[in-house]
Amino acid sequence: MNHQPNPEILVSLVKDMMPFGKYKGTKLCDLPIHYLEWFNREGFPKGKLGMQLQTIYEIKLNGLEEIIYRLKKTI
């Protein structure tokens, strides 16, 4: 079983912007943890955005931001 994150999803976290709400226009990887915690409590959106928000939430929750820092340097 492969537990490696999909690189295309990780790249999208660094490139894609939040399309609505208080943080509209903010890169997904730069969303504050309290905002992601709110989505975790209230429910993530459906589709790709929801998956992206869940992924960045898990990265931040587990202290894996180094993955994002490295990606930002290469993109």
Image (tube, rainbow, N blue to C red):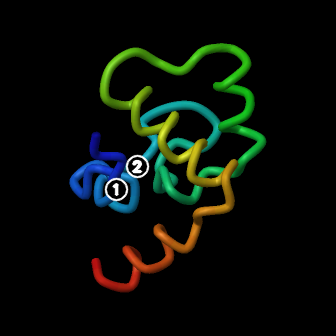
Q: Which of 13 and 24 lies nearest the eye of the viewer? A: 13
Residue 75 at what x, y percent from top left? 28, 77
Name the N-terminal-most of marks 1 and 2. 1
Few, some or many residues within 10 Å of mark 1 (<14, 14–19, 20+): some
Q: Is residue 23 left or right of residue 41?
A: left
Residue linked to disc 2 = 17
Q: Give above or below for 20 relative to 69.
A: above
Q: Amino acid at mark 2?
A: Met
Mark 1 near mark 2, Cβ–Cβ under 8 Å? no
Q: Secondary structure at mark 2?
A: loop
Residue 69 at what x, y percent from top left? 50, 76
Residue linked to disc 1 = 10
Quadrant location, the N terminus: top left
Q: Give above or below for 72 relative to 16.
A: below
Q: Residue at x 26, y 50 (%)?
A: 6
Few, some or many residues within 10 Å of mark 2 (<14, 14–19, 20+): some
Q: Give above or below for 45 relative to 12.
A: above
Q: Nearer the viewer, mark 1 or mark 2?
A: 1
Q: Amino acid at mark 1?
A: Leu
Q: Which of 74 and 66 lies nearest the eye of the viewer? A: 66
Residue 13 at what x, y percent from top left? 39, 53
Q: Which of 12 and 25 lies nearest the eye of the viewer? A: 12
Q: Residue at x 51, y 57 (%)?
A: 29
